[in-house]
Amino acid sequence: MATTIKVSVELCDRINRAAQERRLAAAGLIERLLDAHERRQRMEGFGRAFRGADAAYWDEFRSWDVTLDDGLPGE
């Protein structure tokens, strides 16, 4: 299904030019850009959560890290 969105002539030209450079349709370029934007947002959220981890989290992390690296075969 196709739909129309209203953008300025200048923006339309920019989209088409960038899409041509990448040998994509305009829709493909917009989809890739939106995918990258959403991924960046997820990674920023992960970074905020990681930086906000408290001491209890890091204590549990170390416990699991040691447990998973105990050298026992098959576990």
Image: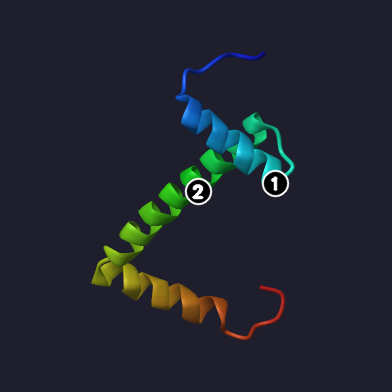
Residue type beneath disc 2: Arg
| Residue at the spot of label 1 | 22
The answer to which quarter of the image holds residue 51 is bottom left
Residue 45: mark: none
Q: Position of residue 53 (x, y in %)?
A: 29, 65
* Residue that sits furthest to the right in the current view: 23
Q: Position of residue 11 (x, y in %)?
A: 48, 32
Q: Is residue 24 left or right of residue 30?
A: right
Q: Nearer the viewer, residue 5 or 39?
A: 5
Q: Counting other residues with Cα less than 10 Å from the Cα at mark 2, is it few (<14), some (14-19), or many (20 or more)? A: few
Q: Which of marks 1 and 2 is in front?
A: 1
The answer to which quarter of the image holds residue 75 is bottom right
Q: Nearer the viewer, residue 5 or 11?
A: 11
Residue 39: mark: 2
Q: Is residue 29 left or right of residue 58?
A: right
Q: Counting other residues with Cα less than 10 Å from the Cα at mark 1, is it few (<14), some (14-19), or many (20 or more)? A: few
Residue type beneath disc 1: Arg
Q: Which of 57 and 39 is in front in this view?
A: 39
Which residue: 31% across, 58% down? 48
The answer to which quarter of the image holds residue 24 is top right
Q: Where is residue 7 in the image (x, y as percent from the top left)?
A: 46, 23
Identify the colour scheme used.
rainbow
Q: Nearer the viewer, residue 25 or 21?
A: 21
* Residue that sits furthest to the bottom in the current view: 71
Query: Please, is residue 4 above or below residue 68 in the view?
Result: above
Secondary element type, mark 1: loop
Which residue: 38% across, 55% down? 44
- Report the Cα–Cα distance between label 1 and label 2: 20 Å
